[in-house]
Amino acid sequence: MSVLLKPRWVALHVFAAVVVAGCTWAAWWQFTVAQDGSGRSLGYALQWPAIGIFGLGVWAWLCRDGIRAAREGDSAKPPPPAPAPVRRTPVVTVDPDEDPELAAYNAMLARLHEKDENA
């Protein structure tokens, strides 16, 4: 539980409290505006508490994961994935007399490939 008292976590707790307080204030403000007959403000007055509750849920989720990670330590981290094998496709040569546009395109790609290889 002491992991949640580290400076990074205290900052998260303060941020969560500010978010909930801000959402509460915004909901109250929209409710007072809605009393003048604004239907849109009434909708906002109902949305702000939902946003605050969502923020509390994210905060609780992060705290739970932080406690779990502190209990399990770094041994619970999965090993990094193996690099994906590079699959090379064979280069098809094109007769320039047969399709000059395709041959020019392939020549451009070859030049770009050489430029990337030398960079």
Image (cartoon, rainbow, N blue to C red):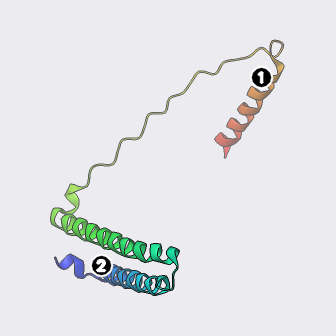
Alpha carbons under labels 2 and 1: distance apart: 59 Å
Q: Quadrant of residue 4?
A: bottom left
- Looking at the image, is 51 positioned above or below residue 27? above
Q: What residue appears at the point 21 percent right and 76 percent down from the top-left corner?
A: 3
Q: Amino acid at mark 1?
A: Leu
Task: Check the picture and name the quadrant holding the N terminus.
Answer: bottom left
Residue 19 x %, y %: 39, 80
- Looking at the image, is 43 positioned above or below residue 108? below
| Mark 1 lies on residue | 102
Q: Amino acid at mark 2?
A: Trp
The mark nearer the N terminus, 2 or 1, is 2
Q: Badge 1 local density, few (<14 within 10 Å), some, or many (20+)? A: some
- Determine whether, in the image, residue 97 is placed left or right of residue 74: right
- Looking at the image, is 84 positioned above or below residue 14? above
Please state which of the two labelled residues, at mark 2 or mark 1, is closer to the viewer: 2
Mark sitting on residue 9: 2
Q: Quadrant of residue 83?
A: top left
Residue 51 x %, y %: 39, 72
SS for callout 1: helix
Q: Badge 2 local density, few (<14 within 10 Å), some, or many (20+)? A: some
Q: What residue appears at the point 51 percent right and 81 percent down from the top-left corner?
A: 37
Residue 23 x %, y %: 40, 80
